[in-house]
Image (cartoon, helix red, strand yellow):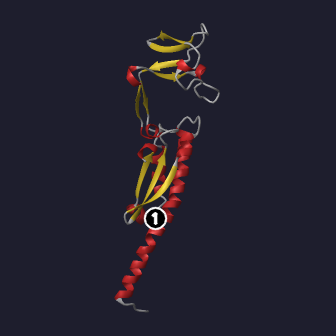
Amino acid sequence: MSTITLEQWVKRIEDIEKGLPGYLQKELTRVGLIAEGKAKLNATTRLRVRTGHLRQSIQHKVKPDGKSVRLVLRAGNRTTVPYARIQEVGGEVRAKSGGFLRIPLKAAKTGAGVDRFPGPLRQSGVDFHVRESGGRLFLFRSDQEGGPPWYRLVKRVRIRPKLFLFDALKDARKLLDPAIRKQLHASVEFGEDV
């Protein structure tokens, strides 16, 4: 059995501490890739995917955090996926300035389920008129007398939380060594948080 001096022991501990951030970085990158894959799968199964922009925006990052390392799972950006946060945590969407939100019905959607007139209707070149039915308001195309309603008008819509990022991070976190898991700071971010 070999013996070491106190100075040698301290040096070994220092060498281990120097290598620890690199090990953590590597381990969190591995788990981050798994979390990213799970989040993309969750987004596919829990949301009605039309364009795939939200799913494509999901990514992980391993960031230095003082003497430790932090795992971040993020989604969205301000321009193409501003709805990432509300899909993750839920909430209420209200019509601006006292107007109405228009919910596309079957007649207003393409085969892929995308609204045929995503911009303002006044710019579409098609005339619509409002009709009430059963206490609800609907938009009908003016040139289709007796045709189906195209949109339902509502003041607000409640979005249920989907937790596609949070659940993926929680599941992937279980794959870490318990000693690392206790020290891990993991978080979810959205495009507007950057």
Question: Residue 22: x percent and y percent?
Answer: 47, 69
Question: Residue 143: x percent and y percent?
Answer: 61, 9
Q: Residue furthest bottom?
A: 2
8 in relation to 77, above or below: below
Is 51 left or right of 32, judged from the image as shown? right
Q: Amino acid at mark 1?
A: Asp
Residue, disc 1: 177
Which residue is located at x 52 percent, y 50 percent?
59
Inspect this view and state whether residue 123 appears: yes
Number of marks drawn: 1
| Front residue of 76 and 137 | 76
Is 123 left or right of 154, judged from the image as shown? right
72 in relation to 27, above or below: above
Which residue is located at x 55 percent, y 43 percent?
55
Inspect this view and state whether residue 41 appears: no
Question: Residue 168: x percent and y percent?
Answer: 49, 49
